[in-house]
Image: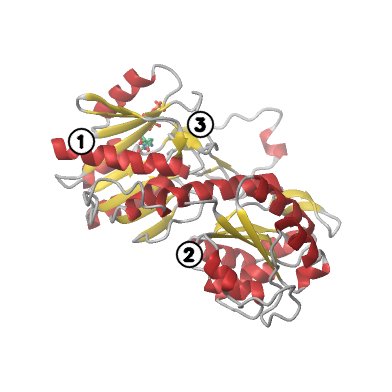
Amino acid sequence: MGSVRVLLMVSGGIAAYKACFLARLLMQAGFSVRVAMTEASTRFVTPLTFQALTGQPVATDLWGEGQSQALDHIEYARWADMAIVAPATANTMAKAANGIADDIVSTLLLAFPGPVLMAPAMNDNMWAHAATQANLETLHTRGVATVGPGEGWLACGTVSHGRMSEPEDILAAAQEMAAVLEGSGSGENTPADGFWSGKRILITAGPTHEPIDPVRYVANRSSGAMGFALAAAAVQAGAKVHLVAGPTSLLAPRGLERLEAVQSAEDMAGAVAVALEAGADWIFMAAAVADYKPSQLAAGKIKKEALGPQWSLEMTPNPDILAQVVPKHRSQDLKIVGFALETDDMMQRAAAKRRAKNMDYIVANNPTAEGAGFGVVNHQVTLMGEAGVIWHSESVPKGQLASDILKQLADTEKEI
Ligand code: CTP
C-alpha cells in the first residue's frame, strides 16, 4: 500500500482548530489527507485553512455549493482507506450511531465502509449523558475506534471530561490503525497459500480492566495492536476470525466473523469458554490478561476519607485462561498459541511457559528491547514450538509481523 489515505472529518466544536494541527501532523507522518467539514465546523475554522494545509478541495456540503471545487457527495468516502472524525461532537456521534445522513460528514460516514477513528469532544454533561454513552457503545460494537476524550479545560469554562485528545495522541492512534491496514490490505504478505483458509480462529487481544469501584480499575499498558493485527492478517488469509477484545481504542479489522468486547479477565474467560465450545481450530491468546483483580468490588466510589493516608489494595488471582479455561473446553485438535512478555531471560522463560501452559507455540517478546515495545508501531518477536526456536523476526510494523507469524506457523504445521 502506498501512503494511507485519510479522510479527516471535522464536526462543529471549538476543538475544530486542533484539527488543523492534526491535518498537518498526519501529512508530516506520510498520510494523504483530505478533509470534510460540517456546516457548524466552518463557523470555527474556515475550509480555506484545511485546503491550504492539504492542497486539496474541502468537502463542505452535499450539493457542492460552498466548495472550492465541485465534489461528488461520496467521492471522498470512495477515495479513503480510513476516516478520522476530529472533533466528533455528540451530534455527529449520534448521527453515526443511528445511520442518519443529513449533512456531508454524516453522509460520508454512512457511505464509508472502512475503519473509523473518532476523537470525541464535548461538554462534560453531554459526554456523560446516557444517550451519548449508548451511542458510543453502539459505535464501539460496530468497530469504530475512539481516542479520548481526556480531562482538561473545556471551552464551556469547566475543567472536566470531554476535551478532545491532543493531535499527537490522535496521530498515534491513526498510526496504529494504519499499521493494521497495511498488514491486511496489500495482499503481498498473504500467508501460506491457503493454509488458513476457512480455519476457525479465536483471538484475544488488549488489556483487561479489573474494577475496583464504579469509577476505578486496574489495567495494563497493552494497546491490543498485536492481537488486532493478527486478526486482520488471519481474515486476509481467509480464516473465520472471532476476536475477543479487552478495552482498546483500536478499530476492528474488516471481515471478522465476530467482535466481542469484554472488560475483565473473568469476562474474557467466559467468552473464550463459549467460543471454544462452539468450535475453534486455533486460539491465539494475545491478550494481556490481568493476573490479579481487586478482591472486592466496591458498590460505590471509594472516598479518600475512607482510604486514609495510604491505600493497600488487596488482590486475588484471576483465572488463568490458557492454563485453566482452555483445557476444559478444548477439542482434541485445537492448536494453542500463547504470548509471553518477558524482560529477563526471555527464551528460557518463554519455553518454560509454553510447556507449563500446554501451548503448541509461544510468541515471545521483550518490550524493553530495541525495536519492540508498548505503543510503538514496530515490533520484534521470537516464535517457539515443541522443538525450540522456530524463527526470530526482524523489527517490523505489527501488521507485517502478524502476517509473518501466520506464515511461519503454517510452514511449521505443514512440516509436521
Ligand atoms: N494468560 C491467560 N490468562 C491469564 C494470564 C495470562 O490466558 N490470567 C495468557 C496470556 O494471554 C499469554 C500467556 O498466558 O498468552 C502468557 O502470559 P503471561 O502473563 O506472560 O504469563 P504468566 O504465567 O502470567 O507470566 P508472569 O509470571 O510472567 O506474569
User: Residue beneath label 2, please?
Assistant: 142
Label disc, if present, on residue 287 of the rendered structure: none
User: Residue beneath label 3, please?
Assistant: 373
Expressed as whole percent of the image width and height from the top left, the position of residue 390 reads: 26, 28
Task: Tell whether circle 2 marks a residue whose Cβ is less than 8 angstroms from ligand 1.
Answer: no
Considering depth in this image, is 348 or 5 the residue closer to the camera?
Answer: 5
Structural distance between the alpha carbons of marks 2 and 3:
28 Å
Label 2 crowd bin: few (<14), some (14–19), many (20+), radius 10 Å:
some
Label disc, if present, on residue 412 of the rendered structure: 1
Classify mark 2: helix, strand or loop: loop
Considering depth in this image, is 201 or 376 the residue closer to the camera?
Answer: 376
Comparing labels 2 and 3, the label whose residue is closer to the camera: 3
Comparing labels 2 and 1, the label whose residue is closer to the camera: 1
Comparing labels 3 and 1, the label whose residue is closer to the camera: 1
How did the renderer colour the structure?
Answer: secondary structure
Looking at the rendering, the quadrant in which ligand 1 lies is top left
Structural distance between the alpha carbons of marks 2 and 1:
35 Å
